[in-house]
Image (spheres, grey):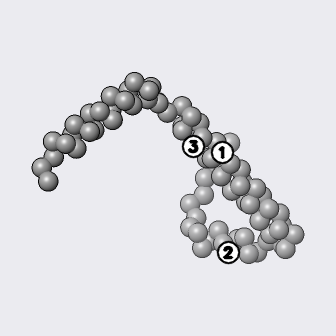
Amino acid sequence: MELRLNIDYNQIMNLIWQLPSKDLEKLANVLQNELSSKKKISKKKLQEIILSAPTWSESDYKEYREARKQINKSRLV
């Protein structure tokens, strides 16, 4: 079962401030843990993307450098 509420930010904040102090602390800890775990996940995803990115072989890079030299020579200064 899914419950959907259509409330705005201010209403949520008013509800939060009505919680007892112990529950406020629990909520703060849960939110902090959720935020830190999402940061870790996004760092992992970024690392995976970087590590799975295509790389140039030495011959590809050499061809690129040679082509770049030719382009730079052909420019009018």
* Mark linked to residue 25: none
Q: Indicate the position of residue 55 as horizontal and vertical percent values.
A: 47, 30
Residue 57 in view: yes
Left-right relation of 25 to 60: right
Residue at the disc numbered 3: 46
- At label 1, the amino acid type is Ile
Q: Residues within 10 Å of mark 3 (few under 14, many from 20)?
A: few
Find residue 11 and report its image quarter: bottom right
**For the point 76% across and 75% down, which residue is it?**
18
State how far apart marks 3 and 1 are (Cα). 9 Å
Q: Residues within 10 Å of mark 1 (few under 14, many from 20)?
A: few
Label 1 sits on a secondary structure element that is: helix
Q: Is residue 5 above or below residue 57?
A: below
Residue 2 in view: no
Find residue 15 and report its image quarter: bottom right
* Mark linked to residue 14: 2
Find residue 64 and report its image quarter: top left
Label 3 sits on a secondary structure element that is: helix
Number of marks present in the image shown: 3
> Mark 3 or 2, which is nearer the eye?
3
Q: Is residue 49 above or below residue 16?
A: above
State how far apart marks 1 and 2 are (Cα). 31 Å
**For the point 26% across and 33% down, which residue is it?**
67
Left-right relation of 77 to 7: left
**For the point 65% across and 52% down, which residue is it?**
39
- At label 3, the amino acid type is Leu
Q: Is residue 77 above or below residue 70?
A: below
Residue at the disc numbered 1: 41
Mark 3 vs 1, N-terminal side:
1
Q: Foreground residue, 23 or 68?
A: 68
Q: Foreground residue, 8 or 34?
A: 34
